[in-house]
Image: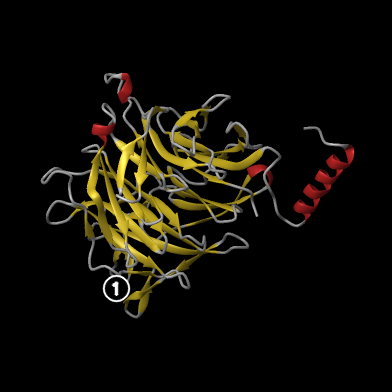
Amino acid sequence: MKLSFIGRWSLALFASLALGLGTTSCSVGTIGYMWVIGQEYNQVAGFKIDQYSGNLTSVVGSPWATEGSVPVAILVRSGGRYVYIINQGEGGSSQGRGAGQSIAEYSVGGDGILTFQQSYQSEGYVSKWAQMDSSGNYLMVLDEYAPGLGSNGLYDGPNTDGNGSITVFQSDPNTGRLNLITNAQTQINAVNLPFWEVGASPVMSKTLGSCLYTVNAGTNASGQQTITPFQIQASSGQLLYTVTGNIAINQSSPGVATNITSINGSESYIFLTDAASNVLYGYESTSACDLTALNGGFTNLANFFPGTQDPDYSLVESTGAYLYVANYSNSSTLPQSAYSNLSAMTLNKTNQELEPIVGSPYPVGSGPTCIVEDPSNQYIYTSNYTAGTVTGFQLNPATGELSDLTKGSTFPTVGKASCLVVSGAIA
């Protein structure tokens, strides 16, 4: 479609006014922006998502430094004006933080350009993941090791019990700046702890409504991995324990060890990927943030998708009708069907059963780590760690089937793409 001179002038005027008011919006034909973090070079790449093809094109100035080392998670605040990158740091342990552990804040400018603002520090050691609450007001950073009780009687030294921790920050809607929120439920020497303790060796966390769940690699006395549940207080950012103790994850086969690699979900459903037994565990969240097993408790993915293995991430698409699981395996000794791929299933909310989608699994770049859906709910993308790429698909909303993008489905990005995030128009 061609615009008249008056139309072009009006569009230019509108854009000028938008910039003058300090807001940005998607470019014509751009439905959103994607940012991909890469661990090989400690960089973040920016892309524009084409409305009509799902194609990715680089943002001007991309890539940018992550202002830390070993980036493991990236989040965008609601409204799309601020992005946070969680850097794990190198060489960290229960004895101290590694070099480059940080939380880097960026403002988002026109066409998805990132500008670094400042860095912050979580209270624990070896950052693993982060989540924002549904309002975007609170950022919750998960660390593998909690602070330990120091000689001064305060929790500000090395870890002593192996448990992890969550540090909560309030995110300023006008500046994106982070302010530490202390734990009002637990005090030492009349001082609020600056963190919340979770189970041993936490792997990943997920917010679902007013609940926050952390899955822990450390096991209980019965050899089971666990989930630490919290209820998020919207008015204060406080995390409350509403369930006594950690929730045990029942093994698909008694006595068989689990290796829970991710926790994800949507609405009231939570799913865990288990790379050790190629199993997907399903739960429903209650109002008290407790979890009840879905019908059957678990799904053996090998029964649906022979040859796939090492599931490590999942995504429930926007309508809640379809579930996608990334399978990491990329061994060249395996048959072609076992290369890195994306399994797709329908989720029947009436009987809570999963069924494989025709044509699944879909091949992706080697080593997929994260999955996102674009803001218009037309496209699905994976970040591929080993390949250093992003793979894109077009989503059929009627069936959940995925197909290649019309202009190519593989996009190179910064090396060892550890995760990605998307945002729509920036307000």
**Toward which corner of the image does residue 96 lie, by quadrant?**
bottom left
Above or below for 419 versus 295:
above
Q: Is residue 378 left or right of residue 214?
A: right
Question: Where in the figure is residue 105, as x and y percent of width and height?
Answer: 55, 53
Q: Nearer the viewer, residue 75 or 213?
A: 213
For image coordinates 62% across by 33% down, the residue present is 52
In this figure, what is the number of numbered marks? Answer: 1
Q: Nearer the viewer, residue 274 or 315?
A: 315
Question: Where in the figure is residue 253, as x and y percent of width and height?
Answer: 14, 43
**Toward which corner of the image does residue 243 lie, by quadrant?**
bottom left
Above or below for 60 versus 291:
above
Residue underneath mark 1: 153
Q: Nearer the viewer, residue 373 or 114?
A: 373
Residue 95 in sight: no
Question: Where in the figure is residue 9, as x and y percent of width and height?
Answer: 86, 43
Q: Residue furthest front?
A: 350
Locate the N terminus and report the quarter of the image it occupies: top right
For image coordinates 22% across by 38% down, the residue present is 276
- Neighbour class for label 1 at 10 Å: few (<14), some, many (≥20)? few
Locate the C terminus and report the quarter of the image it occupies: bottom right
Mark 1 lies on a secondary structure that is loop
Q: Residue furthest bottom?
A: 190
Question: Where in the figure is residue 201, as x and y percent of width and height?
Answer: 27, 52
